[in-house]
Image (cartoon, grey):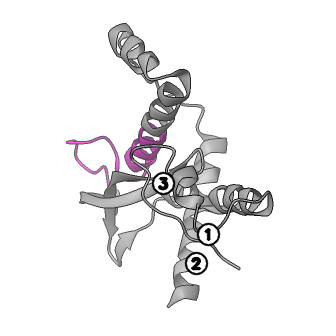
Amino acid sequence: MKRTYQIEERKAIQRFRSHLTNDPGNIQLIVPLAEIAERLRNGVDHMLFEAELQLLQLIMEDEVSWLTGARYRRRDGRSLQRWGMAPGSVIVHGQKVPLQRTRIRGGNGDVKLGSYELFRRDEEMQRQVWSRVMRGLTMRGYDPVIREREKAFGLRIVD
C-alpha cells in the first residue's frame, strides 16, 4: 500500500511540474497595506511566514483549477471535479503547518494534488533538526526550537 501511495505521489508531482513548465499563467497575492503593517508588528519573519503560507495555498488552488476547470462552471468534458475540503499540512520554513486543502475526485477515486504533495515533504525540516542535534541540541530540548511558529504542530525524525 505504501509503495502505491509513493508512486501516485511521484506521478502527481511530475504532473504538477509539467503544468508549471507549460503554463505561463500568473497568480497574485494581494495583501492590504494595513494587514502588512499589522504583520510587521510581529516581525518580518512572521510576515514572510504568513505570506508564504498564503502563496502555497494560491498555488494549490491554481492547480485545482487547472485540473477541474474554473469553480462553479460546467466541467468542459473534464473527468475530475472538486470534492470538498480535507485537513492537511505543509512545511513552511521547516515548520509543519496545518491547512485545508481541496479534494479532487475522478472516476477511480481521489486524485492527489502534485503541489500539495510537493509542499508537504519534510526533508528540509528533518535536515534542520538533525543539524541542530549535531550542534548540541538535546533530543529532549528540541521542542522549543521546533515550535518557532504558533501554527507548527509536528516533527518526524527518520534514521
Q: Is residue 95 visible?
A: no
- The residue to which callout 2 is attached is 6
What separation in Å lies between label 1 and label 3 (alpha carbons)?
16 Å
Q: Residue visible at 35% across and 71% down?
A: 110
The residue range painted magenta reads 56-77
Looking at the rendered structure, which numbered label has been put on residue 138?
A: none
Q: Residue 76: percent from the left, percent from the top?
A: 31, 49
Front-lying residue, 54 or 106: 54
Q: Nearer the viewer, mark 1 or mark 3?
A: 3
Would you say the residues marked 1 and 2 are in contact, meaning their CB atoms lie under 8 Å apart?
yes
Is residue 135 rendered magenta in the image?
Answer: no
Q: Nearer the N terminus, badge 3 or badge 2? A: 2
Q: Residue visible at 26% across and 42% down?
A: 71
Q: Residue 51: percent from the left, percent from the top?
A: 47, 29
- The residue to which callout 1 is attached is 10
What separation in Å lies between label 1 and label 2 (alpha carbons)?
6 Å
Q: Farthest residue toward the right? A: 135
